Image (cartoon, coloured by chain):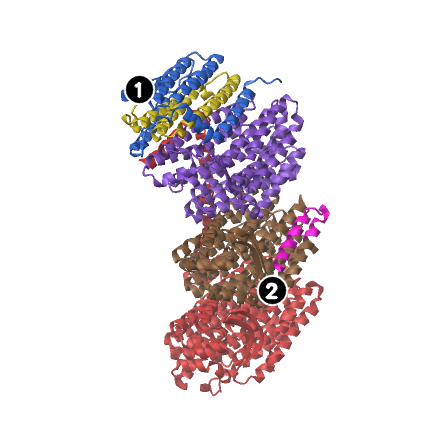
Chain colours: A blue, B purple, C yellow, D red, E brown
């Protein structure tokens, strides 16, 4: 059952990811990307990481994708206006990426002989995550505030029109 | 930890300064704050602290933090005028201060999470800063390229972290180290290490992941370029070395790949610089090349590597600040960043020319400047580690380097006078140049001043 | 909820590798900066998936916590990235990355 | 006496320094008197040395010079019969020539410098013969070469004179290299270059020892250069560019005999190297004949004498080569007298004819220059070997020894003396007999002043009686000179174990043959130039083949130019333009050019397109992973 | 302490020279170099003849790396120090017109003098290297700022070329340093020991590294191509510094550093090196035959002379080394004199082209005489300074290899040919348009040339004055191997 679910979700994720790349209209790309995110969230659930699955939906599909959408609309890009690369360059791109994939997959196979811990249901639960986050990862948590602050300041600074 | 707090606080204060019309006082405050941070950091020397298992303020971290703070201090003095003319000086300053937080995190992390966050804080700030000259397409392009490639590289870095995590089950450096010595899983480990290598090489602009550097350096505002060439580079290498020396010394055979990358970097950086017209771009390539020299110390992982990297980054940064400051002054004055803008400078501004000469000699690695000792020390480390061939190649690359650094000197001392009007150098810039020039010579003559600390 | 052993870890690695590489392909394939940004998001997500898988197999929550930070970083990056893109757009009226080649040589 | 003897060379040196530094500030008379006076003092001291010499040699240590480890050389003088004879010749003949020069150079604007140079020359020549080591001899050796250079090119406005000077120096240098290498080999073999160390040690060597042979051959190369033997003789005729007293002093009486002196001095070494001896004799005799054959057709009065000098030097080497050391030294002495006399006489003629040197434009000067004529005649008799003039005794002693050693050498020697007699009388007849062929209106021939003629007379006397110190036993003499030199040459003679000369009867017979042949060739000359009144053909006229060859000196100079000078210049340009500029520097510059080219290429790679950068990055990663993981 | 005083005095003068009023620039520099000369003369005269280093000063410099500021003077160094301090005042005094930026010019010369002396007195490998490189900077600027028309390209080539060699030397030095016992040290004796303990193969490789540095600096065929151009284009004083003193650095390096450190490496390559050096003698000499530009001609002649010195040193025996030392002195003195004469000629006639000269002796007998004397020194006439050196060198080479010695000996012929050609074509003959109004030496020029002439004769007549000083050190060096 889980295996089939994994496969279905996986195939969905891959297909929609491919559509993200190959669809001409940016809006469609965004939508396909959302779909991918959902599929990935599904996989999270399979991995017993329900909280993350939800966060994934909220943050990515909900926030980031909206941001994208917003920008696309703002810049009025919802047309298939993108000039195409030459076939050669596209081919090279696909080949390069494919090559990398082959290498990557090839090099990562055989990972199953790793020692695997007995499975625990608690790992992905919110209280468990919370404990780890606010005990072990408190400092990164705080520091990421600075990251956001910096990003925010930066985005604002760039985004605002200079009053000259 | 205090360092982080002070820097973050300064950043926040800088943000509010705009609102409270505090711009005038901000600058001294920042310098004061940096000085305070320096003192606090320096105090921790020989008193290693581990914070939340995430940051380890050992001597390595202290020294590099201090180095970064000193460079940042000089940088602020250099960049003040530029940003004061911008509309959003406070934003700039706070971004720099935040990025300093990232840099400090990068030199002191003991957990991959912190490394990742540190890099990102630094990067995100610098992406913005690179693009901060909003009306300038060059600047935009620079920021855009940097961002695009940076976030792309982040993906690889992240993949690498994940794979390492997958094998070891931890993000903690010490745990990873012990796990890696016991695990029999090789493929994932090696892939993880290599991807981390890629990510960090990107940040430290090693070939073939250096492509962004010349373009970004050239397009970004000169002050930001300076910052990238100095603080960012220092932090990147400190993190690079920290990670690889603590975790991966025994695991995986990555040094031969890095060996090739270093060779590639040395030659691409130096050779490409030969035909540049724009001094800024030349310095960008030179920065790439210097990354190659520094990375020699990483390839030759040994007891002296850390101090070699420290000495090299410090002296390189100091010389770079001199060079970029003068470039900044001259390009302001003459409206050109080309080498030709320097023609005849030795007559109009002999002292400026002298400072530039010292900087160029240092970058070229000619005694008695600090740059020489830095190279020497790196070479020493490498030969000690048995990397003699690499050193020989580096020597050849250094020769090419001399060629283009001397083009600048030649322009200043030989080329006919364009305009005889001396360039006015502001007091701050003057101070910076005096400090950096003196430091370049002083550290070259007495490397002991900083060498014994690490 | 389910028996993880049913799905080998290799499969997750495979899946996320594929997704990662599709992301890379997107970056290389397209000229529209926005799509490229999205491809990068895809790459990050692929990594996230792997992280979660490892986390689950190691029975260690740290991996999942790390995903939070990844998301944070992704969000921050994309915010900045889009801001930069807007600035670029203002000047070039284009989101085509090939337009940006003034800096070269 | 010995301590004063050390001062002998320094008087001329003092003269040189004083005149050289004061130069034009010094009145001409003062300079001339100073120069002659210095030489006179030296002569007096030399005379004292000569009188007091008593077989054994004395060394006078002056100062250390160069020393490195066990190697050392010092300024030390050696006084023995050999050096004392040379001292006498140099200071005596030198003094006479100095005096002569007072008259000859009187009107020259560089009169003072001339005397300074002459004094310097004498200084070096004295060093050469006084040296107690080869290295110090080399100092004099090169020093006289320098003076020769300076004096040949004395009238330096003239390019060909300068060329001649340079040629002399360079050719000497070629020989000097051999000499120098010989000295070095001596150092290596004997650990020293001092005679008093080398000669006793050498006696321990086997005859025919390879090292000794090498040393002697190398030393002989030096002698070839200095004494103008084949193949390095061509500079000497050219050296006639210098003022005539110079030709007399340097290129006839003293310097050119340095080679003889050196070989004689090294007698013991040569005695141990039969091969070298043979080479010396061979080169000597061939040069003697060859140079004489050139002299037959020359028309420049000084050139004839120059080739004659080369030829006579060849005789001396022949003597050395056949082991007749004392005979050679004897011939050096007599040759110094008569050849100096000939040159000075020629100088007197030139002086009298205001610079004319071509014998085709002379003739009938017997009346106008009576003293010159008479002295010249004496000298001609002497050189031709007419008994009892000095040249007869010395030359015949050499020939006698040659006969015992190798009959062929003797035959060649006789042919040479035949030629000698012929060309000398040809010269004499063409110059002093017949009618004057020059332009009477332009040139008023006149006899030289006393200051010039007196030296001529003295030398004529010496040329006449000089031979009596060496009258051989066969003619009832006591061969004083060879006894005098015996202490020096004894070891060498012993080593050679010469078959003691043939019977005195045959020696007399040989003399008879020689004299007869000489007289015959004199008659031939008489027939041609007095009876038939033949005058050498004008420039450019066609000559019979052999005569032409002789007249053009067998085209040796041209051959040297074509074979050595030209190719070297070509080689120089080839080295400079091709090897240096194109090849070596080309490689150096290529590295720079290549770097720039690669740099341009790399700039091209840095396209500015971010997608390309990303692609490169991906490919890079793929490669890294591929190489490390697969 | 005395050694450091020497360096410090010079450094102080060099810095002060930047601030004296412009019109006193020359005088200041001249007097300061004279003071230094006097001081070094004092050291020379009181120098004890012994094989040991004198006036040693040793301060820790970079403690953690075993780098010391260790200087001292032995019999070999004192001669080179003397040469430097003797020539520098002459070089400074030989400046004829008011150069632009005189203060910088003089300061650079003084600075360079300091660096050169530093090279000669260093007893620490690292220190040696530093001085070695520092010496390049002033000469580079001298050539760049005051040189001829192609100076940019040529001086850059010179700089990179020479630095290329020295960087390889640096690598070799580091390698040796790492072979010193734990607590590595750059001390000269430690490096000697380290070098000698290496196996012959390693020594041989290191030998080549060192040779690159020294060989380029000297320069030895075929590493010489930078030199004629640089000599030609540098200002006269620069050429004098380069040829008179700086190229001695390379020879000194061979003697002081390479031979004692890598005896087996040397032994393995000596034959090859020797032939290279000998080939250079002949090659450069033959090229000099047809050179028209006097400076270029003397540049090539310098290559030939240095080739002989190198050959003598590679022959590696007492004569060769001592000959090398004495020849360094005489070559330095001769070449400075010759280049100054060229400068005089050029300043009078505006040309260095030999064919357009001639007849100068008619107009300027003093100049011609001085030229002649120095030329005789250069062609090694006995009793001039060239002879003891050339004789010892040739005999050293001959001892090592007869044929090579004989070929090397050809230098005395070749040298005579081109020198006499030059002399004849410039000084003798009839005057040309250029030389018609030639004036004889001025007082200043005499002041420069007379000491040189005196030295030419002094060394020729009394070489032991110098040979004896260096002998113990050389013998120690030879016996230490």
Q: Return the x and y of residue B36 as percentages of the image width and height.
A: 61, 36
Q: Is residue D462 left or right of residue E279?
A: right
Q: Magenta span: helix, strand or loop, mainly?
A: helix
Q: Quadrant of residue C65?
A: top left
Q: Quadrant of residue B37?
A: top right
Q: Read off the residue under disc 2.
A: E457
Which sits in the foreground, E247 or D406?
A: E247
Q: Return the x and y of residue D451 as percentages of the image width and height.
A: 65, 73
Residue at 53% across, 17% down: C90
Quarter holding the C terminus of chain D is top left
Q: Are marks 2 and 1 on the same chain?
A: no
Residue at 40% across, 55% down: E202
The numbered mark 2 sits on a residue in which chain? E
Which sits in the foreground, B370 or D349?
A: B370
Q: Read off the residue under disc 1.
A: A11
Looking at the rendered structure, the secondary structure element under dot 2 is helix
The stretch in magenta equals E1-29
Residue B170 higher or lower than E446, as above or below: above
Q: Residues within 10 Å of mark 1 (few under 14, many from 20)?
A: some
User: Is residue E10 in the magenta section?
Assistant: yes
The numbered mark 1 sits on a residue in which chain? A
Give the Cα distance between marks 2 and 1: 98 Å
Which sits in the foreground, D176 or E312?
A: E312
């Amino acid at each position: 059952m889980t295996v089939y679910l994994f496969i279905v979700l996986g195939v969905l994720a891959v297909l929609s990811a491919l559509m993200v790349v190959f669809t001409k209209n940016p809006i469609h790309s965004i939508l396909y990307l959302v779909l991918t995110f959902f599929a990935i969230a599904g996989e999270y659930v399979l991995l017993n990481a329900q909280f993350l699955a939800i966060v994934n939906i909220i943050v990515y599909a909900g926030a980031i994708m909206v941001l994208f959408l917003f920008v696309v609309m703002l810049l009025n890009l919802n047309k298939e206006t993108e000039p195409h690369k030459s076939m050669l360059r596209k081919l090279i791109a696909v080949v390069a990426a494919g090559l990398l994939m082959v290498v990557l997959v090839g090099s990562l196979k055989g990972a199953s002989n790793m020692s695997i811990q007995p499975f625990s249901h608690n790992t992905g639960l919110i209280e468990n995550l919370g404990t780890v986050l606010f005990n072990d990862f408190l400092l990164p948590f705080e520091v990421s505030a600075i990251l956001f602050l910096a990003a925010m300041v930066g985005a604002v600074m760039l985004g605002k029109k200079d009053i000259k | 930890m205090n360092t982080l707090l002070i820097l973050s606080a300064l950043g926040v204060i800088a943000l509010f300064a705009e609102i409270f019309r505090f711009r005038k006082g901000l600058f001294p405050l920042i310098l004061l704050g940096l000085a305070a941070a320096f003192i606090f950091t320096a105090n921790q020397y020989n008193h290693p602290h581990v914070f939340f298992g995430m940051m380890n303020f050992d001597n390595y971290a202290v020294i590099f933090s201090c180095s970064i703070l000193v460079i940042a201090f000089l940088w602020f003095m250099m960049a003040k005028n530029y940003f004061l003319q911008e509309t959003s000086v406070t934003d700039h300053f706070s971004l720099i201060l935040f990025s300093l937080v990232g840099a400090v995190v990068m030199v002191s992390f003991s957990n991959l999470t912190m490394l990742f966050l540190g890099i990102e804080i630094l990067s995100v700030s610098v992406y913005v800063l690179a693009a901060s000259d909003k009306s300038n397409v060059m600047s935009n392009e620079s920021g855009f390229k940097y961002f695009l490639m940076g976030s792309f590289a982040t993906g690889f870095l992240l993949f690498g972290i994940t794979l390492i995590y997958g094998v070891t089950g931890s993000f903690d450096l010490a745990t990873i180290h012990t796990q890696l010595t016991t695990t029999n899983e090789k493929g994932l480990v090696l892939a993880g290490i290599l991807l981390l290598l890629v990510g960090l090489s990107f940040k430290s602009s090693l070939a073939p992941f250096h492509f962004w550097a010349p373009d970004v350096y050239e397009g970004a505002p000169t002050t930001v370029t300076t910052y990238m060439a100095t603080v960012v580079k220092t932090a990147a290498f400190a993190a690079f070395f920290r990670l690889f020396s603590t975790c991966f010394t025994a695991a995986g055979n990555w040094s031969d790949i890095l060996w090739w990358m270093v060779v590639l970097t040395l030659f691409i950086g130096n050779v490409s610089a030969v035909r540049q017209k724009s001094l800024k771009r030349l310095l960008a390539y030179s920065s790439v090349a210097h990354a190659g020299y520094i990375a020699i110390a990483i390839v030759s992982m040994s007891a002296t590597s850390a101090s070699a990297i420290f000495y090299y980054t410090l002296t390189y940064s100091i010389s770079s600040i001199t060079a970029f400051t003068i470039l900044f002054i001259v390009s302001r004055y003459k409206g050109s960043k080309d080498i030709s803008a320097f023609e005849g400078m030795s007559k109009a501004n002999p002292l400026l020319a002298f400072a530039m000469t010292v900087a160029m000699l240092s970058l070229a690695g000619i005694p008695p400047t600090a740059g020489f000792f830095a190279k020497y020390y790196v070479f020493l480390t490498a030969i000690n580690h048995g990397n003699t061939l690499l050193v020989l190649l580096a020597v050849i690359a250094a020769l090419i380097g001399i060629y283009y650094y001397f083009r600048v000197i030649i322009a200043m001392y030989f080329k006919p006078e364009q305009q005889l009007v001396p360039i006015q150098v502001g007091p701050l810039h003057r101070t910076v140049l005096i400090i950096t020039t003196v430091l370049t010579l002083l550290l070259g003559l007495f490397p002991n001043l900083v060498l014994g600390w690490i | 909820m389910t028996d993880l052993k049913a799905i080998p870890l290799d499969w997750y690695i495979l899946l996320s590798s594929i997704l990662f590489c599709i992301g890379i392909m997107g970056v290389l394939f397209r000229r529209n900066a926005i799509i490229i940004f999205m491809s990068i998001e895809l790459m990050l997500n692929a990594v996230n998936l792997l992280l979660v898988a490892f986390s689950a197999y190691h029975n260690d929550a740290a991996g999942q916590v790390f995903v939070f930070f990844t998301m944070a970083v992704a969000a921050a990056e994309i915010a900045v990235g889009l801001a930069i893109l807007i600035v670029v757009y203002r000047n070039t009226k284009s989101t085509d990355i090939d337009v940006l080649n003034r800096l070269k040589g | 006496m010995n301590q004063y003897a050390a001062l002998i060379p320094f008087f001329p040196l003092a003269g040189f320094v004083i005149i050289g530094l004061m130069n034009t500030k010094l009145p001409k008379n003062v300079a001339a008197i100073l120069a002659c006076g210095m030489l006179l003092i030296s002569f007096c001291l030399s005379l004292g040395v000569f009188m007091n010499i008593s077989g054994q040699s004395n060394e006078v240590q002056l100062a250390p010079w160069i020393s490195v480890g066990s190697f050392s050389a010092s300024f030390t003088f050696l006084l023995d019969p050999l050096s004392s004879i040379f001292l006498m010749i140099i200071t005596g003949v030198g003094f006479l020539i100095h005096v002569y020069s007072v008259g000859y150079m009187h009107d020259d604007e560089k009169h003072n410098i001339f005397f300074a140079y002459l004094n310097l020359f004498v200084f070096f020549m004295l060093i050469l013969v006084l040296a107690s080591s080869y290295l110090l001899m080399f100092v004099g050796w090169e020093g006289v070469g320098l003076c020769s250079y300076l004096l040949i090119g004395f009238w330096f406005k003239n390019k060909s004179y300068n060329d001649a000077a340079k040629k002399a120096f360079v050719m000497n240098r070629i020989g000097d290299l051999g000499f120098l290498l010989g000295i070095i080999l001596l150092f290596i073999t004997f650990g020293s270059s001092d005679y008093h160390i080398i000669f006793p040690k050498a006696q321990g060597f086997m005859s025919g020892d390879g090292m000794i042979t090498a040393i002697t051959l190398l030393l002989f190369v030096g002698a070839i250069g200095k004494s103008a033997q084949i193949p390095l003789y061509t500079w000497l005729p050219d050296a006639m560019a210098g003022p005539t007293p110079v030709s007399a002093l340097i290129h006839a009486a003293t310097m050119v005999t340095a080679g003889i002196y050196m070989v004689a001095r090294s007698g013991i070494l040569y005695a141990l190297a039969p091969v070298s001896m043979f080479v010396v004799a061979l080169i000597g005799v061939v040069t003697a004949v060859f140079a004489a054959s050139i002299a037959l057709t020359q028309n420049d009065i000084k050139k004839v004498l120059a080739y004659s000098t080369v030829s006579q030097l060849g005789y001396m080497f022949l003597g050395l080569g056949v082991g007749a050391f004392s005979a050679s030294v004897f011939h050096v002495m007599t040759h110094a007298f008569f050849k100096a006399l000939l040159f000075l006489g020629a100088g007197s003629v030139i002086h009298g004819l205001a610079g004319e040197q071509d014998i085709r434009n002379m003739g009938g000067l017997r009346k106008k220059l009576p003293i010159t004529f008479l002295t010249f005649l004496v000298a001609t008799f002497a050189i031709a070997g007419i008994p009892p003039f000095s040249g007869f005794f010395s030359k015949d002693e050499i020939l006698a020894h040659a006969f015992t050693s190798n009959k062929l050498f003797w035959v060649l020697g006789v042919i040479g003396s035949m030629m000698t007699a012929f060309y000398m009388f040809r010269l004499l007849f063409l110059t002093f007999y017949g009618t004057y062929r020059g332009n009477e209106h332009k040139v008023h021939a006149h006899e030289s002043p006393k200051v010039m003629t007196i030296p001529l007379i003295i030398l004529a006397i010496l040329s006449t009686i000089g031979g009596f110190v060496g009258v051989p036993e066969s003619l009832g003499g006591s061969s004083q000179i060879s006894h005098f030199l015996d202490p020096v040459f004894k070891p060498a003679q012993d080593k050679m174990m010469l078959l003691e000369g043939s019977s005195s009867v045959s020696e007399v017979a040989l003399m008879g043959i020689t004299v007869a042949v000489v007289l015959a060739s004199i008659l031939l000359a008489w027939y041609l130039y007095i009876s038939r009144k033949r005058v050498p053909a004008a420039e450019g006229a066609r000559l019979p083949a052999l005569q032409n060859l002789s007249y053009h000196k067998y085209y040796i100079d041209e051959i040297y130019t074509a074979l050595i000078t030209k190719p070297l210049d070509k080689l120089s340009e080839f080295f400079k333009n091709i090897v240096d500029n194109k090849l070596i520097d080309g490689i150096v510059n290529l590295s720079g050019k290549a770097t720039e080219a690669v740099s341009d290429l790399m700039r091209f790679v840095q396209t500015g397109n971010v997608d390309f950068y990303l692609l490169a990055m991906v490919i890079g990663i793929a490669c890294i992973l591929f190489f490390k993981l697969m | 302490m005395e050694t450091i005083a020497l360096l410090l005095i010079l450094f102080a003068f060099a810095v002060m020279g930047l601030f004296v009023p412009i019109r006193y620039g020359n005088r200041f520099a001249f007097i300061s170099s004279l003071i230094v000369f006097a001081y070094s003369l004092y050291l020379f005269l009181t120098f004890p003849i012994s094989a040991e280093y004198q006036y040693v000063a040793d301060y820790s410099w970079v403690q953690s790396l075993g780098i010391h500021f260790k200087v001292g003077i032995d019999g070999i160094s004192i001669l080179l120090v003397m040469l430097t301090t003797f020539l520098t005042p002459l070089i400074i005094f030989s400046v004829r017109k008011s150069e632009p930026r005189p203060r910088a010019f003089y300061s650079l010369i003084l600075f360079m003098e300091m660096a050169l002396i530093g090279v000669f007195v260093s007893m620490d490998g690292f220190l040696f290297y530093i001085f070695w490189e520092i010496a390049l900077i002033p000469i580079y600027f001298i050539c760049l700022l005051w040189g001829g028309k192609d100076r940019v390209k040529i001086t850059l080539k010179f700089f990179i070329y020479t630095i290329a060699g020295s960087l390889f030397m640096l690598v070799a030095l580091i390698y040796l340093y790492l072979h010193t016992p734990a607590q590595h040290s750059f001390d000269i004796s430690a490096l000697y020991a380290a070098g000698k303990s290496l196996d012959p193969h390693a020594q041989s490789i290191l030998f080549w590294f060192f040779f690159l540095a020294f060989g380029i600096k000297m320069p030895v065929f075929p590493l010489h191509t930078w030199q004629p151009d640089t000599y030609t284009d540098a200002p006269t004083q620069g050429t004098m510094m380069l040829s008179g003193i700086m190229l001695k650095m390379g020879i000194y390096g061979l003697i002081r550093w390479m031979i004692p450190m890598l005896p087996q490496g040397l032994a393995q390559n000596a034959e090859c090196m020797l032939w290279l050096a000998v080939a250079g003698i002949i090659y450069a000499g033959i090229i000099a035959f047809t050179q028209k530009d006097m400076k270029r001609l003397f540049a090539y002649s310098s290559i030939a002379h240095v080739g002989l010195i190198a050959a003598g040193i590679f022959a590696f025996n007492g004569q060769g080394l001592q000959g090398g030392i004495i020849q360094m002195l005489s070559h330095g003195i001769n070449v400075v004199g010759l280049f100054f004469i060229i400068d005089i000629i050029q300043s009078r006639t505006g040309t260095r082209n030999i064919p357009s000269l001639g007849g100068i002796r008619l107009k300027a007998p003093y100049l011609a005489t001085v030229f002649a004397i120095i030329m005789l020194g250069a062609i090694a006439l006995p009793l001039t300074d060239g002879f003891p050196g050339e004789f010892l060198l040739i005999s050293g080479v001959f001892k090592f290899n007869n044929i090579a010695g004989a070929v090397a000996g050809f230098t005395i012929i070749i040298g005579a040919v081109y020198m006499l050609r030059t002399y004849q074509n410039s000084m003798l003959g009839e005057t040309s348009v250029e030389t018609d109004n030639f004036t004889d030496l001025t007082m200043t020029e005499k002041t420069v040339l007379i000491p040189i002439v005196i030295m030419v004769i002094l060394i020729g007549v009394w070489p032991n004055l110098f040979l004896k000083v260096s002998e113990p050190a050389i013998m120690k060096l030879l016996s230490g191997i």
